[in-house]
Image (cartoon, rainbow, N blue to C red):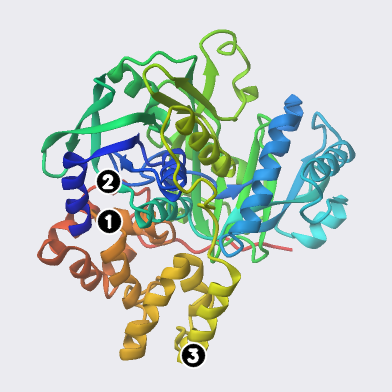
C-alpha cells in the first residue's frame, strides 16, 4: 500500500513522456517495453492490474489453429511465431502442451482433412513443436478412456502452449518489470478523460480508494483500456478507424477429470471449439463465444448449461457434472477489433482476433484494439516504434525488455537454493519443488526469498492451508505487488480463488495472518469485503467427483 500511495503522489507531481490508461495485457506490455527502454512512463487502471479481460482467458498460448478455416494464414503464422517466441523466452511459465481433438461423425470435415490442416499448422509454425498425429476411434479410447467415442469418427493430436500459472499473474509480471525500470504505476486509479494543451495531455484521474481527483500530464497518451477503449476515446474526443465488438466467454473450474496433461478439444453442438484444459489437480472446461453488446456481463444459467451439456455429452463419466462440482468460474469478454465500415456485417465467429493500433500523430495519442495474449511481445515492440516516431526518445533502444533472466542468473539461483537445502523444505503436498516454483513466479527476485528462509526455515512453510504460498512469499507480495484488496492476491497475483471454493478459503488456517501482513489493522475489514462480494455458484460442500470410466 505504501508503494501505491507514493506512486500516486508522483503521478500528480511529475510530467511523463507517456501515460498508459489500462493495465491488461496490452497496457502491461506497453509499459514494460517503454520503461525498459528508458522512457518515463505512467500506468493507471480503474481496477486492479489485469483486473478485467486479462484475468478471464483460457490460459492458452496458441497460434489460432481455428483461424485457418477462415484462411487467415497471415494471422496464424504471426501468432505461431509469437507463441514460439514466448516458449523460448519464458520456459518456466509458457510450456508446450498437446491438444487431442476429437471429431464427431458427420462433422463438416473428416478427421484426415483436419489432420492435414494440423500438419500445415505445424509447418506454418516453423516445425517448432512436436509433430501432429492422426488417431482412430480406438486410438482415442486407448489414450483417453474418459472420452465418449460412441459417435466419434476419429481425431488428431497437435501442439500449442499454455500458461503454467494464471493469466493475470503473467500480465502482472510485465507491470512488475515496468515498475522495476522506473514506471510509475497505480491500480484503482481511473481516467475521467482529458485534453491536449500546450504540447501535453492533461488527463483528470480519480483515486477510487480515497476519492481524490488530480491531473496527470504526459506528452503521449496510450489508450490500452481493453474493452473500454471506445468509451475512453469518447472522454478524450479521439476519432479512430477501429472500434470494438465483444465476445462473451465462460470457463468452469471443476475437480480433475483426467490425470493426463493434455488439452482435450471438441467441436460443440453448434460447431464452436470447446476445451478441457488441465489445471494441476483441477480441470478448466469451456468456452462459450457469444456476441454481447457491452463489456459488463454476468454469468447466466444458460452459459453454465451450455458448458455442462457439452462436456457431459463428450465425456464418459460415472455421473454427469453438475453445478455442485463447480469450484470457480471465469466469465469475461474478448474485445474484437473491427473497422467502422465493412466488417460489422461479417459472421461473428469469423471476425479476426488480430490487434490493431490506431494512431493520431497530431494529437500524440494511440489506441490499441483487440489482440491476444499470444501476440503480446509484438504489441510492445509496435508501441515502442510508434512512440519513437512521435518524437519520444528511447534512451536504451536495444534493451530486451521481456523474457526470463539469462541462464547464468538462473543457474546462480538454483546453486544458492541447493546450498540452502531449499527443496528439502518443500511441503509433502506440493506439486513442485520450492526452487522451481520460486524461480517461475519471481525470476531474479527469487533471490530475496532465500535470506529470510536462511534466518528462519519456518519462512518456507505454507501459510494459507490448501495453497502453495509460503510465509516469505506473502511478505514479498505485500512489499512489491501493490495488493489493495484481498481479491487482488487470491484471484490475480495467485490462482487460489480459482482452485478453492469460497468457504474453503475462509476456513483456511493462515488466511487471517496473511491478511494482517497485507493490510495490518484493516485485515478484518478486507476479509469481510472479499466474501461479501463473492457471487459463487456453489457455497455448500463439494459433491463427490465424477470419475472417468473405462
Q: Quadrant of residue 202?
A: top left
Are the residues tagged 2 and 1 within 8 Å (C-beta)?
yes
Q: Which residue is mark 1?
A: 482
Q: Nearer the viewer, residue 344 or 322?
A: 344
Q: Which residue is mark 3?
A: 424
Q: State the mark number for residue 187.
A: 2
Asked if residue 277 lies left or right of residue 303, the reply is right
Please determine whether, in this image, residue 550 is positioned above or below residue 133. Answer: below
The reply to whether residue 317 is in sight is no
Quarter of the N terminus within the rendering: bottom left
Question: SS for tag 3?
Answer: helix
Q: Nearer the viewer, residue 276 or 464?
A: 464
Circle nearer the N terminus (2, 1):
2
Are the residues tagged 1 and 3 within 8 Å (C-beta)?
no
Q: Callout 3: 10 Å neighbours few (<14), some, many (20+)?
A: few
Please determine whether, in this image, residue 301 is positioned above or below residue 443. Answer: above
Asked if residue 261 lies left or right of residue 16, the reply is right
**Residue 431 location, x and y as percent?**
53, 74
Q: What residue appears at the point 33 percent right and 65 percent down from the top-left corner?
A: 504
Asked if residue 214 lies left or right of residue 52, the reply is left
**Residue 531 location, x and y as percent?**
24, 54
Are the residues tagged 3 and 2 within 8 Å (C-beta)?
no
Question: SS for tag 2?
Answer: loop
Please determine whether, in this image, residue 533 is positioned above or below residue 517. Answer: above
Amino acid at each position: 500500500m505504501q508503494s501505491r500511495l507514493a506512486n500516486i503522489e508522483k503521478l500528480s507531481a511529475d510530467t511523463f513522456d507517456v501515460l498508459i490508461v489500462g493495465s491488461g495485457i496490452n497496457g502491461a506490455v506497453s509499459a514494460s517495453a517503454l520503461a525498459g527502454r528508458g522512457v518515463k512512463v505512467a500506468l493507471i487502471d480503474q481496477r486492479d492490474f489485469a483486473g478485467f479481460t486479462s484475468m478471464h482467458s483460457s490460459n492458452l498460448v496458441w497460434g489460432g489453429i481455428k483461424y485457418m478455416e477462415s484462411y487467415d494464414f497471415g494471422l496464424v503464422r504471426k501468432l505461431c511465431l509469437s507463441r514460439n517466441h514466448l516458449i523460448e523466452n519464458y520456459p518456466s511459465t509458457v510450456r508446450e502442451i498437446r491438444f487431442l481433438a476429437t471429431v464427431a461423425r458427420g462433422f463438416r470435415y473428416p478427421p484426415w482433412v483436419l489432420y492435414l490442416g494440423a500438419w500445415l499448422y505445424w509447418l506454418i509454425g516453423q516445425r517448432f513443436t512436436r509433430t501432429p498425429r492422426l488417431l482412430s476411434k480406438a486410438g482415442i479410447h486407448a489414450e483417453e478412456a474418459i472420452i465418449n467415442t460412441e459417435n466419434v469418427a476419429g481425431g488428431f493430436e497437435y501442439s500449442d502452449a499454455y500458461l503454467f500459472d494464471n493469466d493475470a499473474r503473467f500480465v502482472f509480471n510485465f507491470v512488475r518489470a515496468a515498475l522495476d525500470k522506473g514506471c510509475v504505476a497505480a491500480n484503482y486509479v481511473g481516467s475521467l478523460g482529458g485534453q491536449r494543451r500546450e504540447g501535453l495531455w492533461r488527463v483528470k484521474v480519480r483515486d477510487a480508494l480515497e476519492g481524490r481527483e488530480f491531473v496527470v500530464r504526459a506528452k503521449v497518451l496510450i489508450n490500452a483500456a481493453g474493452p473500454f477503449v471506445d468509451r475512453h476515446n469518447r472522454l478524450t474526443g479521439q476519432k479512430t478507424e477501429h472500434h470494438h465488438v465483444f465476445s462473451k466467454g465462460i470457463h468452469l473450474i471443476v475437480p480433475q477429470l483426467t490425470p493426463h496433461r493434455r488439452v482435450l478439444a471438441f467441436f460443440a453442438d453448434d460447431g464452436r471449439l470447446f476445451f478441457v484444459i488441465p489445471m494441476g489437480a483441477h480441470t478448466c472446461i469451456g468456452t462459450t463465444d457469444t456476441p454481447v453488446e457491452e463489456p459488463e456481463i454476468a454469468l447466466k444459467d444458460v452459459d453454465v448449461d451450455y458448458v455442462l451439456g457439452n462436456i457431459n455429452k463428450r465425456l464418459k463419466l460415472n455421473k454427469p457434472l453438475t453445478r455442485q462440482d463447480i469450484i470457480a468460474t471465469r466469465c469475461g469478454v474478448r474485445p474484437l477489433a473491427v473497422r467502422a465500415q465493412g466488417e460489422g456485417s461479417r459472421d461473428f465467429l469469423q471476425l479476426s482476433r488480430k490487434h490493431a493500433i490506431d494512431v493520431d500523430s497530431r494529437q500524440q495519442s494511440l489506441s490499441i484494439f483487440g489482440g491476444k495474449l499470444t501476440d503480446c511481445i509484438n504489441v510492445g515492440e509496435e508501441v515502442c516504434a510508434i512512440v519513437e516516431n512521435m518524437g519520444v526518445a528511447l534512451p536504451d533502444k536495444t534493451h530486451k525488455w521481456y523474457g526470463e533472466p539469462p541462464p547464468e542468473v538462473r543457474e546462480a539461483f538454483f546453486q544458492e537454493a541447493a546450498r540452502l537445502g531449499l527443496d528439502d523444505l518443500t511441503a509433502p503436498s506440493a506439486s513442485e519443488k520450492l526452487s522451481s516454483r520460486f524461480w517461475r513466479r519471481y525470476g531474479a527476485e527469487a533471490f530475496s526469498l532465500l535470506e529470510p528462509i536462511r534466518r528462519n526455515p519456518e519462512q518456507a512453510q505454507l501459510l494459507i492451508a490448501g495453497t502453495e504460498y509460503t510465509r516469505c512469499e506473502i511478505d514479498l507480495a505485500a512489499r512489491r505487488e501493490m495488493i489493495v484488496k484481498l481479491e487482488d492476491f487470491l484471484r490475480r497475483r495467485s490462482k487460489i480463488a480459482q482452485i478453492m471454493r469460497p468457504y474453503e478459503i475462509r476456513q483456511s488456517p493462515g488466511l487471517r495472518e496473511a491478511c494482517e501482513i497485507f493490510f495490518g489493522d484493516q485485515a478484518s475489514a478486507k476479509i469481510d469485503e472479499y466474501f461479501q462480494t463473492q457471487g459463487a455458484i456453489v457455497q455448500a460442500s463439494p459433491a463427490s467427483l465424477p470419475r472417468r470410466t473405462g
